[in-house]
């Protein structure tokens, strides 16, 4: 097992419980570093509604088998068995009541003594396939194995040790890669008067509806010193390509024009920004009306101006300069092409005994526990495949 993250630990435990001798290699000094920082330190460990439509992949059908065979309910049963208290933060999203470390400890506890051993702080320098075995050269010496599981994740959050290792090994064995990019990541804006004005909104958060490509996400939008973030924007980032337009509705489910028209009747002597701040945060209201003199009252606002403002509130369009990249990305989109992997057991179609799981695969989940569920489901599928291969 190469990688002691969410997917690697899950697969190691299942393989060890099935009677295999498993060695887990990781260049970090401790397991599950990405788990520990997830969910604000409480780990959003699954989403009860995880389904294929919540995942991006060049082959959208690839996830079906693994998700069906190991479901969110299955993982919750394991959490309950280890007496870990949890709660719903929002419908379907499950978090630990305590610390994310409870999930790491649970996964480590699932690795039975004598069956699974760990080589932390160990780097692999070569992985070769010799006849029916794999030969691994590491900083802790040479190892042989009947099967190898690649579980080192993608390129996101390099400060936690993310690397291209799984991609490099897969390419060496003839696998193709779907081009990678940062996903679930904040946007940055280019310079210019509007971008400079937007930076003054840093810290303002509003409900929003974001349209990107053919997808729409409804959740909070957060203005930052560099651009845009918040759950809705993070979701959109996984579907966004450079030069693409973000369509932003700052008042989802509302009717800005009716409100403004009524506001002109109710408060004819008030300034436009003052009335709009009844609907939106004050700083945002001032930004949206900055071209209107503060001395102009609502009574002097023509229908044309109110229609234009309502249009901007509901159909504001922004072209980001880019994203904050892998340093701030929660996941990596793209990865090892699923065409050379079995959807049943995550096994390589090119090299018998090689399996790839988790974020390294071209499968990326939505925000909210979907990526952890993919880690658990793909790990269980691969563990079954590795057990069958080693016993065959």
Image (cartoon, grey):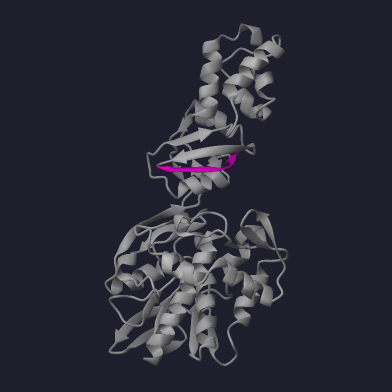
Residue 362 seen in render: yes
User: How would you classify the magenta stretch by its main secondary structure?
Assistant: strand
Q: On the rendered image, what quadrant is the C terminus found in?
A: bottom left
Could you tell me residue 259's position as x and y percent? 63, 21
Could you tell me residue 78's position as x and y percent? 62, 75
Q: Residue at x 57, y 37 (%)?
A: 208
Position above or below: 189 against 155: above
Residue 3 seen in render: no
Quadrant in the rendering for residue 348: bottom left
Q: Residue at x 62, y 69 (%)?
A: 76
Label tally: 0
Task: Reply yes or no: does residue 221 show up in magenta.
Answer: yes
Task: Reply yes or no: does residue 28 show up in magenta.
Answer: no
Could you tell me residue 113's position as x and y percent? 60, 90
Position above or below: 90 against 68: above
10 to the left or right of 177: right
Q: Residue at x 47, y 39 (%)?
A: 211
341 to the left or right of 76: left
The segment highlighted magenta reads 214-223
Q: Residue at x 57, y 56 (%)?
A: 368
């Amino acid at each position: 097992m190469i990688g002691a993250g969410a997917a690697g630990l899950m697969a190691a435990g299942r393989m060890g419980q099935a009677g295999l001798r498993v060695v887990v290699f990781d260049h970090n000094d401790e397991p599950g570093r990405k788990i520990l920082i997830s969910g604000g330190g409480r780990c959003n460990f699954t989403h009860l509604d995880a389904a294929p439509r919540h995942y991006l992949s060049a082959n959208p059908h690839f996830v079906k088998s693994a998700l069906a065979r190991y479901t969110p309910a299955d993982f919750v049963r394991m959490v309950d068995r280890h007496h870990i208290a949890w709660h719903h933060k929002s419908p379907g999203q499950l978090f630990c009541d305590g610390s994310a470390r409870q999930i790491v400890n649970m996964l480590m506890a699932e690795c039975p003594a004598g069956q699974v051993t760990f080589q932390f702080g160990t780097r692999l320098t070569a992985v070769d396939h010799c006849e029916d075995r794999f030969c691994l050269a590491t900083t802790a010496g040479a190892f042989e194995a009947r099967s190898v599981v690649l579980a080192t994740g993608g390129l996101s959050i390099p400060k936690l040790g993310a690397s291209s290792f799984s991609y490099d090994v897969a390419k060496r064995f003839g696998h193709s890669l779907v081009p990678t990019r940062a996903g679930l990541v904040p946007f940055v804006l280019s310079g210019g008067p509007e971008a400079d004005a937007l930076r003054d909104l840093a810290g303002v958060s509003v409900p929003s509806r974001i349209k990107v490509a053919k997808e729409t996400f409804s959740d909070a939008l957060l203005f930052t010193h560099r651009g845009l973030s918040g759950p809705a924007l993070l979701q959109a980032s996984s579907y966004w390509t450079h030069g693409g337009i973000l369509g932003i509705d700052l008042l989802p489910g509302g009717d800005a024009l009716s409100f403004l028209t009524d506001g002109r009747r109710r408060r004819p002597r008030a300034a436009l920004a003052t009335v709009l701040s009844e609907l939106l945060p004050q700083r945002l209201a001032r930004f949206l009306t900055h071209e209107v003199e503060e001395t102009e009252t609502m009574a002097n606002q023509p229908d044309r101006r109110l229609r234009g403002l309502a249009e901007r509130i509901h159909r504001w369009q922004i072209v980001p300069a880019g994203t904050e990249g892998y340093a701030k990305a929660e996941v990596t989109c793209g990865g090892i092409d699923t065409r050379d992997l079995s959807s049943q057991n995550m096994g390589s179609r090119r090299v018998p005994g090689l399996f790839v799981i988790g974020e390294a695969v071209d499968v990326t989940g939505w925000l909210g526990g979907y990526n952890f569920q993919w880690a658990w489901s793909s790990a269980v599928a691969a563990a079954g495949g590795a057990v069958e291969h080693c016993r065959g």
